[in-house]
Image (cartoon, rainbow, N blue to C red):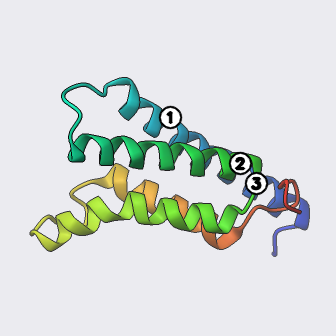
């Protein structure tokens, strides 16, 4: 039995809120715990945290959802891929893998009916 259009729209809304909200909270956590000297590494980390927060806000409101979620896939997936290249198992970070897959699903699904850019 195929899912109704209304169920798909609600699913995309909830997925968008979860992925965007998590990106916003993750970026905020990085900035809240930022300390140390101003160096290239610290500034790059802060910049990536701000990018993650901005993408999260755009995903939550549904503006350019597929593009912002695709950027988040890169931000979330890069540490996982680095770990895999250096010998970590695929399931070494189940939370990171879950976050990557949900963000990828959000990028593929798009904003849905209740997105701002609809």
Instruction: List x then y, in percent, for residue 6.
Output: 90, 59
Decide: few, some or many residues near mark 2? Use Cα within 10 Å; few <14, some 14-19, many ≥20.
some
Q: The C terminus is located in which quarter?
A: bottom right
Q: Quadrant of residue 100?
A: bottom left
Of labels 2 and 1, earlier in sequence is 2
Q: Residue at x 32, y 54 (%)?
A: 94
Q: Which residue is mark 3?
A: 62
Q: What is the CA distance from the residue labelled 3 to the residue labelled 2? A: 11 Å
The residue singled out by tag 1 in the image is 25
Between circles 3 and 2, the one closer to the viewer is: 3
| Local secondary structure at mark 3 | loop
Asked if 46 appears above or below 59 in the picture, the reply is above
The residue tagged with tag 1: helix, strand or loop? helix
Give SS at disc 2. helix
What's the residue at 23%, 47% (across, down)? 40
Residue nearest the observer in this picture, 27 or 4:
27
The first of marks 1 and 3 along the sequence is 1
């Amino acid at each position: 039995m195929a899912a109704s259009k209304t169920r798909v729209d609600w699913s995309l809304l909830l997925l968008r809120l979860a992925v965007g909200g998590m990106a916003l909270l993750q970026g905020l956590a990085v900035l809240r715990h930022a300390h140390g000297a101003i160096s290239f590494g610290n500034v790059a980390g802060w910049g990536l945290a701000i990018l993650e927060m901005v993408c999260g806000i755009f995903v939550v409101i549904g503006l350019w959802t597929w593009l912002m979620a695709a950027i988040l896939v890169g931000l979330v997936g890069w540490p996982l891929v680095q770990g895999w290249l250096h010998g970590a198992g695929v399931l070494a970070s189940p939370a990171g893998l879950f976050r990557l897959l949900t963000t990828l699903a959000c990028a593929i699904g798009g904003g849905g009916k209740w997105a701002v850019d609809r």
